[in-house]
Image (tube, helix red, strand yellow):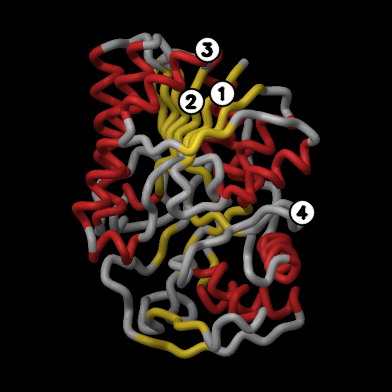
Amino acid sequence: MTILVTGGAGYIGSHAALELIESGYDIVVLDNLSNSNIESIKRVKELTGKDFPFYHIDLLDREGLEDLFNKYNFNAVMHFAGLKAVGESVSIPLKYYHHNLTGTINLCEVMEKHDVKKLVFSSSATVYGNPDRVPIDESFPLSATNPYGRTKLMIEEILRDLHVSDSSWRIALLRYFNPIGAHESGRIGENPNGIPNNLMPYITQVAVGKRERLSVFGNDYETHDGTGVRDYIHVVDLVKGHLKALQFLDHNEGIESFNLGTGTGYSVLDLINSFSKNSGVEIPYQVVDRRPGDIAICYANPGKAEQMLGWRAEKNLDEMCMDSWNWQKSNPNGY
């Protein structure tokens, strides 16, 4: 089977590419390299000992997509490509709507034209908006508190409508909670361009001395220590969920949504303390104002994925922190 991996040079996409190859799939990777690095592709090839095609293509490039689908007979697509920073999406919403929605529509139109109707979509727990209780399951009402989240929610709706129009589509909507960690080799990991938007890469950059201190956005939430609580999941566990979803689509028609999380919530300070314990490095931080669009508590009920996909997260917070540190100390300046 040949799988197209969009956004496959990125943090999650590169780990998925590696896992797909190690599970015996043939892959083709597409990425516009706007928030990723070609070095990750070289390292996936090095780690797996396998070569695979890489194309520097943007999903907004319809002609480039057409050429790619003319060249390969894809069995399915894993769709990771998209802009993904919550704060940035509040500042430049039109760019997020254009890239994430138009790119996905282009992809689906080309897939449809070439009769490739199996799709694993990288969605997000942000589609639950500000839930009134936790843990969150897939039956919760959907909404969003920022433009990034709304793009994920809109794409989910687009894909549902697509399935209604043509029931031969098989689609898995994977709602990520908070991926952290890195491959155990320390060769691939999270490598944001510029100032990190996510918590763990900021912590690791403080730990290696690239940044002076961490900003903690708010300590007045209704949580056990006042800081925001999230469901952190190891990126390797997360991408194993994608393979389980792909296998599920081989045997099941329709469109299904799945939470990919651990089912446990940890606060910002819990994460800082676990990282310090496992790295031996103290992380200086200062509390600043809350960020617009952030919510207090968000963690998953991952029971549906366990029941229907046979998947569950296996790695704990200490392992997530150790692997994140192993990646950053081995690559202090990223790729």
Near-viewer residue (239 or 111)? 111
Of pointers 1 and 3, the one earlier in the residue sequence: 1
Would you call the spot at circle 2 few (<14 residues within 10 Å), some (14-19), or many (20 or more)?
A: many
* Nearest to viewer (mark 1 / mark 3): 3
For mark 4, give the secondary structure: loop
Give the residue number, with chain letter if any, for mark 1. 3
Q: Left or right: where does residue 68 sit relative to residue 41?
A: left
Of pointers 4 and 2, the one earlier in the residue sequence: 2
Near-viewer residue (235 or 16)? 16
Q: Amino acid at mark 2?
A: Val
| Quarter location, residue 110 | top left
Give the residue number, with chain letter if any, for mark 4. 184
Q: Mark 2 to mark 1: distance in Å?
A: 6 Å
The picture places residue 235, in percent across and down from the top left corner, at 61, 50
Q: Which mark is residue 77?
A: 2
Q: Amino acid at mark 3?
A: Asn
The picture places residue 251, in percent across and down from the top left corner, at 54, 12
For mark 3, give the secondary structure: loop
Q: Which mark is residue 250?
A: none
Q: Would you say the residues marked 4 and 2 are in contact, meaning their CB atoms lie under 8 Å apart?
A: no
Residue lying at 51% horizontally and 33% vertically, measured from the top left: 55
Q: Which mark is residue 73?
A: 3
Q: Would you say the residues marked 2 and 1 are in contact, meaning their CB atoms lie under 8 Å apart?
A: yes
